[in-house]
Image: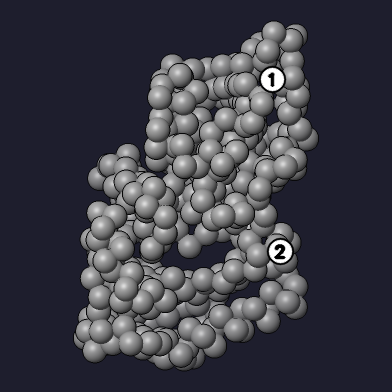
């Protein structure tokens, strides 16, 4: 029989890496099984936003607000530099003025900017409506570098990492669990969109997003990002914000992806006309794991002591917050903050 780990984490994207890290820092023997090299379908293919998102249920809004601060604190000054952290704030023209009191009630700094104020602050940006919600504490980073930093910290804490895909989870002797030839006292399924294949009945589906990178002017066109536009310091612009619920194919080389990229660019030109003539650099497609109600799935799996789930969209934002609290849960701590996100809710 192989050695028994304290915790086996299935999935090594940013959420699985953060769960493993914080469990190891609590003194647990942790192993990660990861099917992909660079964050699979989601982390490495994201826009890299670390944000509060906008109006949402109070417990989730509070969690996201705390998650932004905890991510910055976990990285520290040196880590933020290494991760390409931009403390730039965001503009959300998709949220109306009535979103501001909701955000303020949740402890989030927010204010309404009229279209005139937006034009004054972001001259290149043409707000598509009467204005936008300004969230000054939102940030963004390079998701691949952030994942590498989290994985490196996990390895330093003693986490063992294997490139191996688990086909399922099964009971082992003595109340333990087994997966892909390994045995552990506790298993955390954190495999993103593939988690549903490991735990049939998990209320989770794919949500495909497409991102187009273009080379803009040498100076960034935007100081803040929007849900669909992120200007990088070197002038590149990422154009995203697309959602295709139920679509789980990564089809970057397809005609359909090219068509979506064309729609993204057309929409971006309406909001950022200075992109006219910008040189296209690359296109990528990611698959968000989208719970049925849009909230994280984090906690014990029903009727299976020792088996846990930790899956969410917005993993770049939520990973450190979830990882720390999941580690507490696995160590037997009371973690009331996770109650609203139980998989059996």
Q: Where residue 205 sits: x, y (%)?
A: 67, 54
Query: What is the basis of the colouring in this image?
Result: one colour
Nearer to me, 37 or 170: 170
Going from the N terminus, do you reach mark 2 or mark 1 first? 1
Q: Taking 123 as reference, is 29 left or right? A: right
Nearer to me, 61 or 47: 61
Task: Work out which quarter of the rendered image holds the C terminus and state it.
Answer: top right
Q: Residue at x 66, y 26 (%)?
A: 303
Secondary structure of residue under mark 2: loop
Task: Work out which quarter of the rendered image holds the N terminus and state it.
Answer: top right
Q: Where residue 200 sits: x, y (%)?
A: 75, 40
Q: Are marks 2 and 1 in contact (CB under 8 Å)?
A: no
Q: Residues within 10 Å of mark 1 (few under 14, many from 20)?
A: many
Farthest residue, direction right: 167
**282, above or below 296, in the image:** below
Q: Residue at x 68, y 43 (%)?
A: 202
Q: Where residue 156 sits: x, y (%)?
A: 44, 26
Secondary structure of residue under mark 1: strand
Nearer to me, 143 or 186: 186
Q: Residue at x 59, y 69 (%)?
A: 243
> Which quarter of the figure has residue 114?
bottom left
Residue 301 visible within the image = yes
> Which quarter of the figure has residue 222?
bottom left
Residue 177's disc number = 1
Q: Taking 19 as reference, is 87 left or right? A: left
> Which quarter of the figure has residue 310?
top right
Q: Residues within 10 Å of mark 2 (few under 14, many from 20)?
A: some
Nearer to me, 291 or 231: 291
Farthest residue, direction front: 345
Residue 247's disc number = 2
Residue 235 visible within the image = no
Q: How many marks?
A: 2
């Amino acid at each position: 029989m192989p050695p028994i780990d304290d915790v086996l984490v299935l999935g090594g994207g940013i959420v699985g890496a953060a769960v493993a890290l914080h469990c190891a820092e609590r003194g647990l023997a942790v192993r990660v099984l990861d099917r992909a090299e660079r964050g699979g379908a989601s982390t490495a293919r994201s826009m890299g936003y670390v944000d509060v998102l906008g109006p949402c249920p109070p417990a989730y809004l509070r969690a996201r607000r705390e998650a932004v601060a905890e991510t910055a604190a976990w990285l520290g000054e040196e880590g933020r530099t290494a991760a390409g952290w931009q403390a730039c704030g965001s503009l959300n023209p998709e949220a109306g003025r009535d979103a501001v009191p909701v955000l303020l009630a949740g402890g989030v700094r927010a204010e309404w900017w009229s279209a005139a104020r937006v034009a004054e602050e972001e001259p290149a940006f043409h707000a598509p409506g009467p204005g936008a919600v300004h969230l000054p504490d939102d940030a963004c980073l390079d998701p691949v570098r952030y994942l590498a930093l989290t994985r490196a910290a996990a390895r330093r804490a003693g986490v063992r990492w294997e490139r191996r895909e688990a086909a399922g989870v099964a009971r082992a002797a003595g109340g333990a669990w087994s997966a892909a030839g390994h045995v552990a006292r506790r298993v955390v399924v954190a495999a993103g969109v593939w988690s549903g294949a490991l735990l049939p009945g998990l209320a989770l589906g794919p949500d495909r997003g497409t991102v187009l990178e273009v080379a803009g002017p040498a100076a960034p066109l935007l100081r803040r990002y929007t849900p669909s536009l992120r200007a990088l310091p070197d002038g590149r612009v990422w154009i995203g914000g697309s959602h295709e619920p139920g679509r789980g194919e990564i089809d970057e080389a397809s005609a359909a992806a090219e068509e979506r990229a064309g729609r993204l660019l057309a929409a971006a030109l309406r909001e950022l006309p200075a992109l006219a003539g910008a040189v296209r650099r690359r296109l990528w497609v990611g698959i968000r794991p989208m719970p049925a109600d849009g909230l994280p799935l984090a906690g014990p799996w029903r009727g299976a002591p020792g088996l846990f789930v930790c899956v969410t969209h917005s993993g770049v934002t939520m990973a450190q917050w979830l990882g720390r609290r999941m580690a507490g849960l696995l160590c037997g701590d009371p973690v009331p903050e996770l109650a609203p996100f139980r998989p059996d809710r």
